[in-house]
Amino acid sequence: MGQQESGQQLLQRYFQLITGQNVPVVTASQMTTQQELDQYQTRIWIGQQSVVNAALGSDLTNLGTDGFISRSNVNSDGSADVYLTGQNWWGTTWAAYELLERYAGCGFYGPVVEGTNDGPDGLLNVIPQLSSISMPDGTNIVEDPIYKSRYLQSLPWSFPLIQQD
């Protein structure tokens, strides 16, 4: 799965859960003319693509493996562009989660356990009901962890669980 697909699917799913509205997903190739751009008051550009790379420039090239950038800009015509990306697909996914947590009020406090009736958002997650989601103009979040990876890997040996007598 590419970084654009991962971030797009995540945001589309949660925007639907939060607002009850279906958010269209279009590709950059469908947004090449001003007329096509003008169809949408707000555009969220997800993942590394030419529009995002041009908007973020050296901030993106200097980003580490697990880092991400979330940036917003209101244009002179009143339309807005939001850019969410990382160096890899997982950085883009972190950017999408950051937008949901910070600006939509979501809380992701535990995993969705497959095979349970936790629902699409998980038993320990908070998904608010809102009419819209707003990100302030001029938002510029650059998160670049100093460690190599956010993922934990299981060790090749097992640990015993020892209970008190």
Image: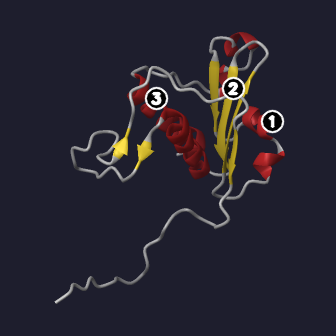
Q: Nearer the viewer, mark 2 or mark 1?
A: 2
The image's mark for residue 81 is 2
Q: In what element is the residue under mark 3? A: helix
Q: Amino acid at mark 3?
A: Phe
In the rendered image, which residue does mark 3 sit on?
Answer: 15
In the drawing, does residue 21 fall left or right of residue 146? left
Name the residue located 38 percent from the left edge and 27 percent from the top edge: 129
Residue 2 visible (yes or no): no
Q: Amino acid at mark 2?
A: Asp
The CA distance from mark 1 to mark 3 is: 26 Å
As rendered, which of 9 and 103 lies closer to the eye?
A: 103
Residue 115, placed above or below residue 37: below
Point out the tag, 2 or 1, that comes first from the N-terminus: 1
Residue projecting furthest to the left? 165
Q: In what element is the residue under mark 1? A: helix
Residue 44 visible (yes or no): yes
The CA distance from mark 2 to mark 3 is: 17 Å
Q: Quadrant of residue 127?
A: top left
Residue 87 x, y percent position in the rendering: 68, 51
- The crowd level at tag 3 (other Cα within 10 Å; few <14, some 14-19, many 20+) is many
In the rendered image, which residue does mark 1 sit on?
Answer: 54
Residue 98 x, y percent position in the rendering: 56, 43
Residue 76, placed above or below residue 17: above
The image's mark for residue 75 is none
As rendered, which of 164 and 38 lies closer to the eye?
A: 164
Q: Amino acid at mark 1?
A: Ala
* Tag 2 near tag 3, CB within 8 Å: no
